[in-house]
Image (cartoon, grey):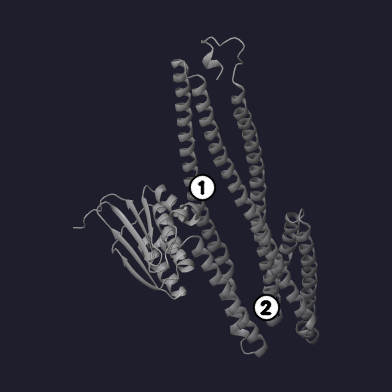
Amino acid sequence: MASSTTETKPLKGHALLPARLWLPLVVAAAISAAIIGVSELSYRWFTGAQAGIGQGFILREKLLQLEKTVLEAQTAQRGYLLSRKNDYLGPFQKSVDGIRPLQREVLDLAYQDKAVRDRVTELSQLIALKLADMERTIKLASNEEFERTLAVLEGEEGRQLTEKIRIGFADLNKLVSQQMETNTARWQDSMENSRSAIVTAVGLNVALIAMLGLLLIREHRRTREETRVQTDVAERLESEVEKRTGELSSLSAFLQTNSEREKAALARELHDELGGILTPAKMDLAWLQGRLGGDAEYGERMNRLAKLIDQGIDLKRRIIENLRPSLLDHLGLASALQWYADEACKAANIECNMRIAEGLERMPGDLEIALYRVVQESITNVVKHARAKKVDLIVERTAKGLRVVVSDDGVGIADLETAKKMSHGLAGMSHRVRSVHGTFDIRSHPGHGTRVDVFVPLAAKKAVA
């Protein structure tokens, strides 16, 4: 500020700036330094959490490969013992050879985490015992010592060892998943801290700038030139604030879009990877059931294993649908909304009335997922908070765009303005709609339900001859 007043002649005995102006400047500098420190710390947390999540994904993938390879070795062993065909020895040896490198990779990934490393070491010892047991049975069978082979197979020690290995894999996967959840929470906290730091910096700096402007105007009121300079400075700062606010809004929209894309990518990966594991397992189990189903003991275990695989397939489907609804990609917004509303209302025992436009054209992917998430969040709020008996969903195509309305007959929102400010769900829906250039309106009265009204402009729909 001193450089803007060098052409005027300051009164003798006066300081360059009044003493009361130095305090806000010092406070602003201190706040800026603190914000920089918080931002740097948040970035380090973000980087560390991101690395932890990535390593967790790799470790879990290797654990799945190791478990699959052990199961393949068991399958080949039992195939040889049942058929006495040497064709099974090659796959068995290939699986055994593949287990040890996978064990080393898993141990290397878990090296820095003592809890995981100890679990991996224990599991490796159990697998080593199991491999030795399987190799012993194959050797006995090769020597036609069938009674000893049968005794080993039916022994309680072998079953206990197999169960310990299964529990070891389950516990290890659970531990890795818990650590990934912790890293994900750290990642979210770091993002929130960084966002809070930016918002705090903008707010405090705007407040300090406004206070400085007022003090400077009062201090230099007698000269028009200084008033003009101060006004110009304030205008430039206001423009900078608007620019930064726009950048933050754009960044938020980008992060939201990128999050949806990452969910879609993760859903595709889960579909490909888990499908590639569970489907062959189901086929192999069906093959084994066709040959061992006559045995009561084997039949019971096969049926239990079949139920577990079916549960895994169903869990995979539910996770994928939560990450990225497949109907949205394959059949479009109308079918996806109809399916979701029907399923959600049935699960909550709520009557659902739907009026969805027929022949709705496909729209850009970002627009479809934004509208789907808005309806999903609205119905979720109805199920959790509204205590409603009925939900109405309207999707209509107008000449100017697409209108989506979700209304209920629940308890309503007592203080809608406060809810708009405090509810992250409402803020998220509003931002999603604004990011696709739409309008978002919510109305509610206590005891008379809530109505969410969304409109997105679209090009005029071409008439079909």
Q: Are the residues at dot 1 and dot 2 in contact (C-beta closer than 8 Å)? A: no
- 115 horizontally vs 183: left or right: right
Label 1 environment density (alpha carbons within 10 Å; few <14, some 14–19, many ≥20): few
Residue at 62%, 11% (x, y): give it.
13
From the top left corner, tell me how far across and down residue 140 is, in percent: 80, 80
| Secondary structure type for disc 1 | helix
Residue at 47%, 56% (x, y): give it.
419
Q: Earlier in the sequence, mark 1 or mark 2?
A: 2
Residue 62 visible in the displayed image: no
Image disc number at residue 141: none
The label nearer to you, 1 versus 2, is 1
Residue of label 1: 255
Quadrant location of the C terminus? bottom left
Task: Work out whether 342 lies above or below 195.
Answer: below
From the top left corner, tell me how far across and down residue 158 is, in percent: 77, 79
Image disc number at residue 79: 2
